[in-house]
Image: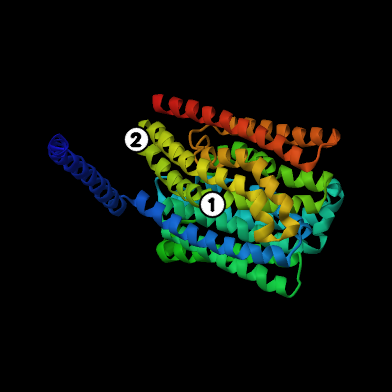
Amino acid sequence: MSDKVSFMERFTPIKYGIVTWVISKICYFRDNTCERSIQNPAYKGFFSIVSSSVLGQLVVLLATPIVTRLYSPSDYGILSLYGVVVSVTLVFVTLKYELAIPLPKEDEKAINLMALCLLSVFGMSVISSLLIYYIGDSFFSGIQLSLLSPYIWLISLSVLGGGAYSVFNYWAIRDKCYSDIAKTRVNKSIYGSTGKITLGIFNISPLGLMLGEFLGQTTGCLTLLRSFLSRHRQKLSCVSWKMMLSVSREYYRFPLYSCPSVLFNTLAFQMPVLMLIRFYGPDIAGLYSLANSILVIPASLISAAVSQVYLGEIAQFLHKEPTRIKSYYHAVTRKLALISLPTISFIAILAPFCFPLIFGAVWKEAGFYSTVLSGTIIAQLIFSPTSILHYCGRNNWVLLFDISRTILIGGVFLLCAKMGYPPLTSLAAYSITMTLMYAVNYFMNLKAITGLARE
């Protein structure tokens, strides 16, 4: 007994020493993190956007079980088709010049880029609306675009509002006004969800879903517009036709390469909706839409915020410290992986059991869709926010990658449909294809960043 007491007496100082060391390290990490959060604008922006994203997505999550009981899977399918048309049209309305807004050192150039984008948004939205109205039904009859015929007017307004929002959002990134971006996330979620529920109660479907989306988008645009005018109203006098022409020539690579590459990128993401409506009908497309959105929500709370802050920091590194880009790229990618892997995997396992309980029995099959889609969602949330091929001057690489991915995805769905496979099998094949393409994109970014550091 005395030996045991003697041992405990000897071990006690060591034990207290270990505990003291651990506590000191925890306190150091806490204090160091808080200090960096206070002093570093990137940390401030990150936490500002994350907190608002959490609140905004919480609103969406709480509203979704109500919305799914007010609207049918077919209504969701028509909403998905509406989203396809709007997102594809939005690719052209700015000619992707908004991607260049954070790049110029001089505010005068950036202001003229923004003016060029807004002018393009107005003109192209009018042209695209006329094209959709006159030739849309005949050109896209194979994918049942006629389902949207009563809502052409809303598509036009959504394109106008969405294009303006994208322009002002990139200016907010340039200014590192992350709190303003944060406000738009909350406002979009609150007004969008409220609109869908209110119109659904009055049985205005599927128009209620589309009007809710439009209401949220418009609210976010007005928030960023007020923020811009409060800071830069006096600088609008520097806008001129000559300067707009000059910046359009200087950043010609964006409409030349980025515009078509973003088009194919958008088509790659929207291809499941188009193919599912074409081969399986709007009900299946609606089930896919819910499954995909529920998977994206949790991890995107962080990844979307990281993307906003990440692009702002990368733009600074390009001018001052290009050698730091590679380590920053690796660090952000690792953090996104640590967040996305456990979060999406957990949801994918529970989805088949929880979907009918939360969203209603009619949505049961969407839970199985979530499981097979989890692989591509994980890869998307890790590698998509960190891709900077545009900023590395590799716009042509992006174009080639997006064309290849779009063709592969379309081919996968077409082959599965021709062989008579059910929607679940088609989505599993799609998920595998997308995951492999994201791995290719990762190595393309590494090669581009390495070449940038050598220049």
133 above or below 441?
below
SS category of the residue bearing label 2: loop
250 above or below 156?
above
Instruction: Find disc 1 in the rendering and name its residue.
Output: 298
96 above or below 78?
above
Per the rendering, the mark at residue 263 is: none
Q: Residue at x 66, y 55 (%)?
A: 355
SS category of the residue bearing label 1: helix
Instruction: Tell me residue 64's x, y (percent).
Output: 63, 62
Instruction: Tell me residue 44's x, y (percent).
Output: 36, 54
Q: Earlier in the sequence, mark 2 or mark 1?
A: 1
Q: Residue at x 44, y 64 (%)?
A: 233
Instruction: Tell me residue 411's x, y (percent).
Output: 76, 32
- Residue type pointed to by label 2: Glu
Mark 2 crowd level (few <14, some 14–19, many ≥20, 10 Å Cα): few
Q: Residue at x 76, y 55 (%)?
A: 77
Instruction: Find disc 2 in the rendering and name its residue.
Output: 321
Q: Quadrant of the N terminus?
A: top left
The residue closer to the viewer here, 367 or 81, is 367
